[in-house]
Amino acid sequence: MIAILAVAAVTVGTVGLGAVGTRLARTTSDLLVASRAMTAWWNAAAISGEYLSAASFLGIAGLEMQNGVTALWQSLGFTAGYLCLLLFVAAPLRRFGSYTISDFAEARLRSPRLRALASATVLLIGGFYLVPQLKGAGLALGVVTGAPYFVGVLAVGLVVALNVGLGGMRGITYVQAFQFWLKVFAIALPACLLLIHLGGLPARAALFGDQLPSAGPKGLVVSLPGPQPVTFPAATRYTIITSPHGRATDHARHAFAGEQTTLPVGRLVLPPHAPVPVASGTTALRGSEWARPVGGGGERSPLFVYSLLIATFLGTMGLPHILVRFYTNPDGPAARHTTVRVLGLLGLFYIFPGIYGALGRVLAPQLYVTGATDTVVLRLPQAAWPGTVGNLLGAITAAGAFAAFLSTSSGLLVSIAGTISHDVWPRVSREKTTTVAIRRLRFRLGAVLGMLAPIAVAFVAQGVDIAVLVGWAFALAASTFCPLFLLGIWWTRLTAAGAGCGMVAGALVATSGILVGLALGEPSGVAGDLLAQPAIVSVPIAFLTMIVVSLRAAERPTPDAEMLALHAPEGLDLPEMGVRDPFVLGESATRAQG
Amino acid sequence: MAPDAQARGRTPPDAQARGRTPPDAQARGRTPPDAQARGRTPPDAQARARTPRDELADATEHGALYLRRLRQRQLALSLLALVAFGALVGVLPLAIDLVPQLTRLELLGIPLAIWLLVVPLPPIFLVLGALYARRADALDESFRELVRRR
């Protein structure tokens, strides 16, 4: 009940603040004037606030509980991505004055066709990244209210589409900065209090020894809302209660090690210290395996870890909702200093998710049975500290999860809707005579359309872990936009044809790897690692294609004006050389404002 | 919105940012020599010796050369930072994989490998980023000096 109130408060507060803020800052120039008065700390908190998504808040802890501490490489990569952004992209891009990836592609390489390709890629990546947000929302609402998964996905998808369509939230640095600190508070306070309450990490044998995840000293009762296929990692006795109250239908059973069975609807009762069965498709890990960051196969193989690090390190800059936020920095050096602060703020946040994964392994083993490890951040407080305090802490994490989900998916949807309304719409209606009202209507339709596909995919991908879905989005971004930015900013000989071919090649390799991996049911071995996390292959392919095709061009491109706009320091009083098309800029401004 | 957008198209928002005196120059009490001339072309611009700034503004080959030097120095700095990052982060997975002691030895009851994974890297990113930003700003500043002086 408290949790429902907390979630409602966060949602209403975000939507409401956004609506009021948008009314106050009506034009983009207002927004820029306001943002000049903003310090680098505010900007950094706003960037971090939009970046920390369901994957960071729920996904990492869930993946850690399931696959072990190897999941923490992901949070490392999420942070390191901003280092790459800082080193190669932040200042030049801010100077160039492009609001969006599509603007950059068009203006840097003087090619409207490349813009179309970039826009298509924005839709693909944005859609991929929205799915895990929706999945997180569906799970979170289910935990808080008991609503079925699809209700949560639909309801929250609707709220976000409404929020974006009505122009809320976007561009309001204060709201995003507030969201960041809300998220830090919501993940840090329960984690710290739980650690103090438990007196440190409990049950070290289960974490680092050779124990399997097992029922506590009082046994374990798991309620099963649907038939649940499971694997028993070790021999144990168990009881299934199928009738709500009676004992008439109790079945005492015995499972042998490795037994696969489908548990019926009802309640599973395990005796004290019995190893818990795990949902099929997942593996029960002994403590020593669980605690090993690298080593062995699958998610812990060095190849997979390196590929994941490459995807997150290079992919961050290619997420559609990241760059717009950098525009609130007044100039290039400010963009640099803001990014440095982002590194610090993200480092602070990512201290905490790992604590939930570790505690969840010991205190919430029932999540292994249903495979719902993604909900560990939401469920752990009640499981570890039954009673009012646990409920209260659970409400706090639920509110934080909703803040994470709302801010990221709103940012994504703004980018998607802007792209749909500006680039996908038939060219006929792109004439300058279109009124503001029509453009706004198009943006709203774009917001609705942009939400439909991710909702559909979120239904299908219910069984895929949040962190895995996010990993794909990063792999895709790293294989397309990262080479576009790095070569576009630092290499004069990049041509539009080269950039286009490289992006297509990178996207094809990355998506086909992911899809083939899914179709084959996650094969094991080196091939499986590469299919599950294709960045280590697809990124070099994209770079090489761009370079080779560009070098084969008949004439050398002469991007002197573009290079001047990208790299000339401020304060030289040079004529403007960045994005010159007033229509493009005006449209982008609308987009940035939402 | 439409006329507003048009107006903005003519003077993009960052034109103001770029025309402004850099905040650090103000802080140090320095006035850029061309601050006075901003906004209008001096009538004797042709007569005066051409400065690197003119070369840049007129997009001559000379100006492109100046800019290329700056770009290359900035890129070299970024790549240096990248190598430092790669050496620190890139080695870690392999080290944990190949050195079993890291997973066996424990500090405060937690394996050393987990400490290595969780504790040192985020602060290192922060320090690396801050050092880089300082050097990159300094490169920009020295370019500004070069362009203004002659």
Image: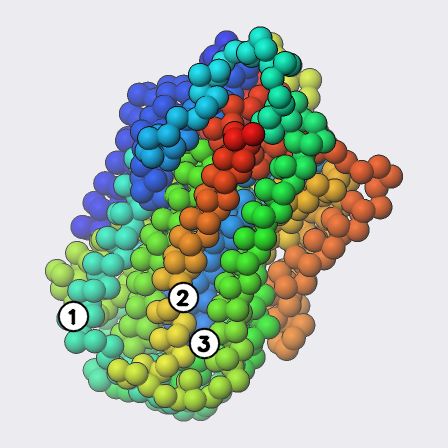
Q: Position of residue A382 (x, y in %)?
A: 21, 64
Q: Amino acid at mark 2?
A: Leu
Q: How far apart in space, not on screen, are marks 3 and 1 (Cα)?
A: 25 Å
In the rendered view, would you say A196 is above or below A146? below
- Check contact, mark 3 vs mark 2: CB within 8 A: no
Q: Residues within 10 Å of mark 3 (few under 14, many from 20)?
A: many
Residue farthest toward the right in the current orientation of the protein? A554
Between B32 and A136, the one nearer to me in the picture? B32
Q: Chain of mark 2?
A: B
Q: Chain of mark 3?
A: A
Marks 1 and 2 on same chain: no
Quarter of the image that includes the C terminus of chain A: top left
Q: Residue at x 16, y 70 (%)?
A: A196
Residue tagged 3: A293
Q: Residues within 10 Å of mark 2 (few under 14, many from 20)?
A: some
Q: Position of residue A350 (x, y in %)?
A: 35, 60
Secondary element at tag 3: loop
Q: Amino acid at mark 3?
A: Pro
Q: Earlier in the sequence, mark 3 or mark 1?
A: 1
Secondary element at tag 2: helix
Q: Position of residue A271 (x, y in %)?
A: 27, 86
Q: How far apart in space, not on screen, are marks 1 and 2 (Cα)?
A: 25 Å
The disc at residue B121 is 2
User: Does residue A379 appear to the left or right of A443 in the view shown?
Assistant: left
Residue tagged 1: A196
- Check contact, mark 1 vs mark 2: CB within 8 A: no
Q: Amino acid at mark 1?
A: Ile
